Amino acid sequence: MILKELELKNFRNYDDLKLSFSNNVNIFYGNNAEGKTNILESIYFLAITKSHRTNIDKSLLKNDKLFSKIKGIVESNNNVNKFEILINSKGKSVKINNQTIKKISNYISKFNVIMFYPNDMELIKGNPSIRRKYLNIEIGQVNNKYLSLLNEYNILIKNRNEYIKNKLFKEIDLNYISTIDEQISKKGAQIIIIRNQYINKININTKNIYNNIFGNGELTIKYKTNIEIDNYELENIEKIFYNKLKNNIKRDNFLGMTYYGPHRDDLTFYIDDIEVKEQSSQGQQRIIVICMKLGEIEIIKENTKEYPILLLDDIFSELDENKKNNILKYLKKEIQTFITTTDINKISSNLLKNGNIYLIKNQNIIKKQ
């Protein structure tokens, strides 16, 4: 998968920008706050329809502009497609080859990216909602039906929560709740199975990656759900989940929320069976996240028959040469890569000679090579 061209209008600090890229490596360097990360953010947003830095789309608009537009030409499986996202006061709209796509879930997965950025360590030390969001985005890139399923599940949970909130100290219609719980348990069971399968695949891919980069230890990611599953057969999960909902309706009614289900799932990270959240250094946490995302590359390749685009936002600055070189071994020539850095001297000479280099200064982008 190759991003051939990128065009920005009123995006972050850019009024009008049009860039073409190397199929191999594209390096953006310059001082902080010049707009390097904004370039990677725009590519990520064009693929995922979400920013990795904010949940407020309007904040992506430059100053007080009325709209922002991101356009890209992507070559994939010998086809060339034009992607476009418009952000304005009404929200956002997406197009592929000038055709409006009504459902975002039908847009996502057509253009795949993997991004590394400094705040990625929140995946380990942050709250569970961050890990769920990450999981949903990454699975959605290879399974757009999952996004539709997740949306349907969230609507059901919202309806259930609103109902039980309004029934505090009042009689609950058990027939009504039972009907909703049946739907929730069926869709929730499918979500749990898909998530569990995805994490299992990542673990297969990261089994040796962490050891090769860090030098010792085995990284394992464990998927945690709060409904105590004894096996991952669909009918079994549906039954267990439904009974959890049924048996805890009084508690949920008192809390005003649905306590059990995949909307409360989490991930935990282990090195040699020791949980790393509280005991690992920031450097080790960074390596763990990098390994996890490197493990995703092959999952996307397996599902789409092409490698995703890699976005590396200043990830090399805090790594020693040995770890940096070990990571670079996984950056295959077939993978188009975008890198930002404040110091061009910290980038491998092999990378420098194989791609385009851009200096960003005073909001101007100058192609140096």
Image: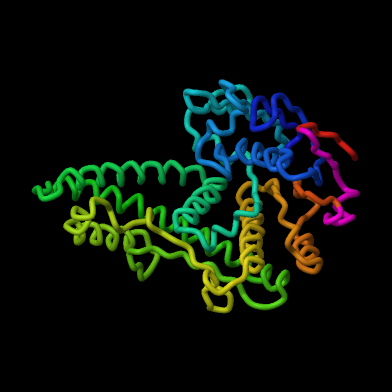
Residue 113, position in %: x, y? 65, 46
Q: Quadrant of residue 244?
A: bottom left
Q: Is residue 348 magenta?
A: yes
Looking at the rendering, in which quadrant would you find the C terminus? top right
Looking at the rendering, in which quadrant would you find the N terminus? top right
Of residues 86 and 280, which is closer to you in this image? Answer: 280
Q: Going by the image, does 235 lie left or right of 303?
A: left
Q: How is the image coloured?
A: rainbow
| Point 55% across, 72% down: residue | 276
Residue 333, position in %: x, y? 81, 52
Q: How many marks?
A: 0
Q: Going by the image, does 71 lie left or right of 30?
A: left
Residue 233, position in %: x, y? 38, 63
Which range is magenta?
345-362
Q: Going by the image, does 233 lie left or right of 174?
A: right
| Point 36% across, 45% down: residue | 154
| Point 64% across, 32% down: residue | 12
Q: Quadrant of residue 129?
A: bottom left
Q: Is residue 368 above or below residue 222?
A: above
Residue 215, position in %: x, y? 72, 75
Q: Is residue 214 above or below residue 225?
A: below
Q: Is residue 107 magenta?
A: no
Q: Going by the image, does 268 lie left or right of 219?
A: left
| Point 85% across, 57% down: residue | 348
